[in-house]
Image (tube, rainbow, N blue to C red):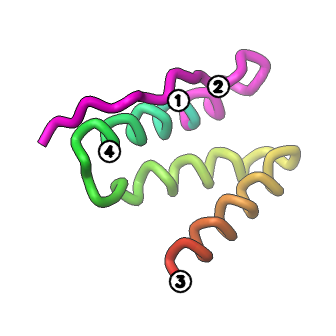
Amino acid sequence: MLRNTMSIDKKASKFLPQDVQDAINTFITQTNIIEEYDLDSMPPEYTTNLLKTLGKYPEFINVAFELIDILNNDSN
């Protein structure tokens, strides 16, 4: 069912490495699709890709860990 919702109109910052930009932007796009079609969940590949991409960079490893904590708390 298609819903009339407000989508997230954001993009990753241009100063980020290209693969991080791509992973973030893909995740945002998928989030918009979930919201638009009132889906229950996101395919895990999108989250996995985002976490793996962030984990490649020492400066983003804490962000990846914070996202993992959020996901773990959300599933409890």
Q: CA distance from mark 3 to mark 1?
A: 27 Å
For the residues bearing labels 4 and 3, Cβ distance under 8 angstroms: no
Number of other residues with Cα within 10 Å of mark 4, as a class: few under 14, some 14 to 19, many 20 or more: some
Q: Which residue is mark 2?
A: 12
What are the residue bounds of the magenta stretch? Answer: 1-23
Secondary structure, magenta segment, majority class: loop
Q: Is residue 62 left or right of residue 71?
A: right
Q: Which residue is mark 3?
A: 76
Label 1: state its secondary structure.
Answer: helix
Callout 4 amino acid:
Ile
Q: CA distance from mark 1 to mark 4?
A: 14 Å
Q: Position of residue 56 (x, y in %)?
A: 73, 48
For the residues bearing labels 2 and 3, Cβ distance under 8 angstroms: no
Q: Position of residue 39 (x, y in %)?
A: 25, 52
For the residues bearing labels 4 and 2, Cβ distance under 8 angstroms: no
Q: Position of residue 76 (x, y in %)?
A: 53, 83
Callout 3 amino acid:
Asn
Q: CA distance from mark 2 to mark 1?
A: 6 Å
For the residues bearing labels 2 and 1, Cβ distance under 8 angstroms: yes
